[in-house]
Image (spheres, grey):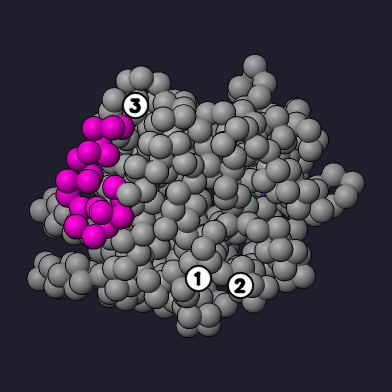
């Protein structure tokens, strides 16, 4: 895998020369859910005319609604360690930040953190760590995953552990796979080689190519559910979108399927990392909305993840434009969920610090169905199998009922009374707009949940 920077520059030049009617034609094609070519992406990046922008956002909204309906999948990160040998100029965990209180949670602490998350109603977590492990090396991460899965609280448990840890050798990816992870996620941060070397100052992460090849190694090792991303604010966002396009098309060509998710973190202030407060290429809120909309059209079947780095307002705006997964109730310092001090030694500051229940109520009032579903991964619908179902639209027949049953489970077991009220209403509204067969299936599943069954999915 190589990023061809020359081709990106050429696409951006050609994109700048597209007429209004070219853009309209690109958007019409995008509405057919066939994705976009590099020059199309470049052309959409260059839109500034308010009317064309409106058309771009409308197309993205329609594609989002067509493929994902009202569902928004919810998860939360679990930071197990902030030990790190790298020196990334934007991150509070960087090795040169000597003032940071460093710790790797013990297995008992990880179990306590997990219990706190399960008691809030979470079913999906993203396990996160810096790139340095305690004495047992990478086995620490494997034991952490097993610990999370081992915690049971009545009928509550974490049913899917996604992982964001530094790139591994193929043999370690195989071991990761054996521990039943959901998605393996890693962000290139920036695909722009020169910028990459300016902001990664020491440690293994200075190797751009080792990181870029990570997904090839992961998939070759049998992990067919991978997530990629860019840390926006480092290099020109238009360059990054075209590089993402190249990365995705490479994976599709090589393995027959692309990433399951794309994450779109924007740089947030971080202690001991001045660059984070002064991004070299700041991304405005308008550009950020364009990024989400263009990605939605570029890869209609790939999930887009929005984290709590963003404020509640920005998050709300981007749900309609294409976001399909959000984190909620997040903390980015190891030990924060079960401790009283929620903010010491954070990786970066959060834009949205609301609890899971507050986010669920808000999202439900906006007309979405917060989904805690983990069905696909547990039934082996991943990688090429997932895409085979997703592309003809068949996956909706599973996702919509599964989203509703996992949401009702949350409402009955964990929600505050006002959240329950808002949630029940949004379930009733969603049922009304469903096709007869998935609705029938959803009603059967909801009845089982009402009768006390848990973890019902199809
Ligand atoms: N240490 C591993 C790595 O760097 O790939 C994995 C975990 S790292 C804690 C997760 C992600 O946090 C990074 O990939 C980066 O994109 C993001 N991040 C770091 N500093 C950030 C900041 N100041 N604002 C927003 N996101 C940041
Ligand atoms: Fe370490 Fe990851 Fe932070 Fe870089 S981004 S300093 S590798 S935790």
Q: Which residue is mark 2?
A: 219
- Residue 383 shows which numbered tag? 1
Q: Quadrant of residue 154?
A: top right
Q: Where is residue 270 shown, x and y percent of the image?
A: 58, 33
Helix, strand or loop for disc 2? helix
- Specify whether tag 1 is near ligand 1 (CB below 8 Å): no
Which of pointers 2 and 3 indicates the residue nearer the eye? 3
Q: Quadrant of residue 14?
A: bottom left
N-term mark: 1 or 3: 1
Q: Are marks 2 and 1 in contact (CB under 8 Å)?
A: yes
Q: Are marks 2 and 3 in contact (CB under 8 Å)?
A: no
Residue, x 62% and y 32% (percent of image)?
153
Q: Which residue is mark 3?
A: 420
Q: Quadrant of residue 21?
A: bottom left
Residue, x 68% and y 38% (percent of image)?
151
* Up-down relation of residue 303 to residue 158 (above or below): below
Helix, strand or loop for disc 1? helix
The question of residue 171 being in magenta is answered with no
Q: Where is residue 348 shown, x and y percent of the image?
A: 57, 34
Mark 1 is surrounded, within 10 Å at the Cα level, by few (under 14), some (14 to 19) or many (20 or more) other residues, namely many
Helix, strand or loop for disc 3? helix
Magenta-drawn stretch, dominant element (helix, strand or loop):
helix
Q: Which residues are magenta?
A: 423-443
Residue, x 40% and y 37% (percent of image)?
451
């Amino acid at each position: 895998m190589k990023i061809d920077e020359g081709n990106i520059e050429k696409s951006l030049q050609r994109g700048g020369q597209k007429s209004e009617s070219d853009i309209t034609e690109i958007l019409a094609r995008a509405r057919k859910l066939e994705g976009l070519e590099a020059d199309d992406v470049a052309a959409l990046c260059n839109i500034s005319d308010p009317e064309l922008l409106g058309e771009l956002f409308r197309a993205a909204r329609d594609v989002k609604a067509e493929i994902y309906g009202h569902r928004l999948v919810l998860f939360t990160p679990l930071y197990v360690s902030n030990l790190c040998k790298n020196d990334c100029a934007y991150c509070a965990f960087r090795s040169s930040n000597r003032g940071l209180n460093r710790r790797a949670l013990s297995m008992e602490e990880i179990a306590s953190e997990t219990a706190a998350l399960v008691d809030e109603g979470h079913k999906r977590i993203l396990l996160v760590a810096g790139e340095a492990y305690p004495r047992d090396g990478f086995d620490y991460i494997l034991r952490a995953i097993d610990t999370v899965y081992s915690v049971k609280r009545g009928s509550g448990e974490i049913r899917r552990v996604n992982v964001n840890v530094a790139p591994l050798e193929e043999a370690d990816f195989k071991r990761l796979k054996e521990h039943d992870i959901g998605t393996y996620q890693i962000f290139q941060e920036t695909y722009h080689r020169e910028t990459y070397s300016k902001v990664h100052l020491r440690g293994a992460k200075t190797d751009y190519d080792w990181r870029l090849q990570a997904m090839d190694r992961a998939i070759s090792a049998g992990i067919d559910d991978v997530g990629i991303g860019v840390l926006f604010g480092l290099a020109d966002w238009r360059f990054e979108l075209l590089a993402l396009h190249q990365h995705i098309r490479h994976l599709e060509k090589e393995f027959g399927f692309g990433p399951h998710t794309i994450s779109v973190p924007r740089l947030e202030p971080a202690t001991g990392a001045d660059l984070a407060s002064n991004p070299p290429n700041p991304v405005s809120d308008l550009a950020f909305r364009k990024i989400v909309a263009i990605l939605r059209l570029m890869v209609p079947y790939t999930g887009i993840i929005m984290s709590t780095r963003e404020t509640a307002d920005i998050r709300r705006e981007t749900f309609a434009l294409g976001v399909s997964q959000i984190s909620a109730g997040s903390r980015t310092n190891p030990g924060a969920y079960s401790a009283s001090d929620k903010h010491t030694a954070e990786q970066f500051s959060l834009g949205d610090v609301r609890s899971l229940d507050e986010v669920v109520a808000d999202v439900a009032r906006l007309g979405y169905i917060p989904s805690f579903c983990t069905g696909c991964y547990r039934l082996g619908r991943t990688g090429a199998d997932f895409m085979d179902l997703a592309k003809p639209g068949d996956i909706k027949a599973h996702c919509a009922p599964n989203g509703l049953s996992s949401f009702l489970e949350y409402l009955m077991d964990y929600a505050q009374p006002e959240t329950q009220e808002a949630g029940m209403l949004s379930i009733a509204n969603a049922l009304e707009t469903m096709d007869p067969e998935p609705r029938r299936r959803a009603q059967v599943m909801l009845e089982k949940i009402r009768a006390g069954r848990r973890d019902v999915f199809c």
